[in-house]
Amino acid sequence: MGEHQRSSQPCHSDTGHADVRASLPEYATALVLSQNHSARYSVVAAHLENCSTCRAELETLLELVRPAYTGQVVPAPSVPQFDLSFLSRPLAEPAATRPIRMIDDLRELVILFSDALLASIRLPTLAQAARGEALYRFTPDPLPPGNVKVTIDVFAGDDDPELGNVQVLVDVPSRDPFDQAGIRVALRVGDLVWEGSTSETGSVTFTAVPLKLLPHLRVEIALPQ
C-alpha cells in the first residue's frame, strides 16, 4: 500500500470548515509554544490533513505568530503621539470651578478668568476692532438676577504689546437700553484694581491692563437694586 498522502484539494463543502478556520489562530499559537494539542485540536488536525486552503492559512499564521513568541519582534523606538488637535473645545468645568458666581448679599456678579477660559474665548487672529486687534470675547448666557447680559472684550493695546484694554458691557433688561449708566465695575488682579462705572449704553473700558495677568483677572459687577 502506498504512503498516505495529504489531500491538496480545498474542502469548502466541509460543514466544519468555518469552525476550523476560527480555531486556526489559537492552534497556531499552541504549535509555536509546543503545547500538547493532540487531544484538544484533534478535529482541527484531522481537517488540515484534507484541506489545502486551511493548511496554507495556518502557514501564514505561523509566520506571524513565531516572531511574537520567540523574541524576534523589535520594539518600536518610539510611540507616536496622538493628534488631539480636533478636540479644540475644552471639557465643561465642574460647578465648583465655573468662572461665574453671584454674591447675593451685595448683588455683585463675579467673573473669574483662567487659562482654560481664555483658551475657549480667544478670537481668530484676523478679528479686528476700532480699539485694536480683538483678542478675547466672553459672552456668558444671561445671568440672574433679571437675565442680566454681560459681554467682556479684550483688545490689544495701541502702543505696548504687553498691555491691553478690557471693555465690559452690561445690559440690565429692567432698564431702558440707553439708561444703563452708573453700574459699578471693577477689575482686580492681586493688588491691582481698576474701577469705573458704565455709560448710558452700559459700557466701561479699562486701559493698560497687563495681558499676562489675564488668567488671574477678577471682574466684579455691582448690579443695581
Image (tube, helix red, strand yellow):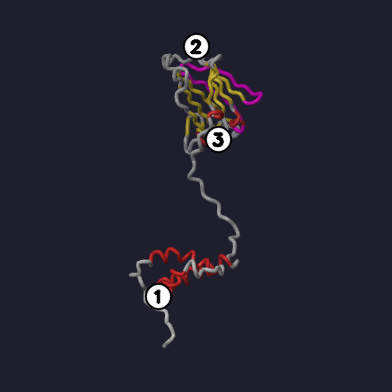
Question: Upstream in the sequence, badge 1 or badge 2?
Answer: 1
Question: Upstream in the sequence, badge 3 or badge 2?
Answer: 3
SS state under label 1: helix
| Magenta residues, dominant SS class | strand
The part of the chain drawn in magenta is: 189-212
In this view, 72 is above or below 112: below
Residue to which mark 1 is pinned? 50
| Residue 112 x, y percent position in the rendering | 56, 27
Residue at 59% in and 64% down:
74
Residue at 33% in and 70% down:
13
| Residue 99 x, y percent position in the rendering | 54, 28
Q: Dot 3: few (<14), some (14–19), or many (≥20) neighbours within 10 Å? A: few
Q: Dot 2: few (<14), some (14–19), or many (≥20) neighbours within 10 Å? A: few
Query: Furthest residue to the bottom?
Result: 1
* Cα gap from disc 3 to disc 2, whole angstroms: 32 Å
SS state under label 2: loop
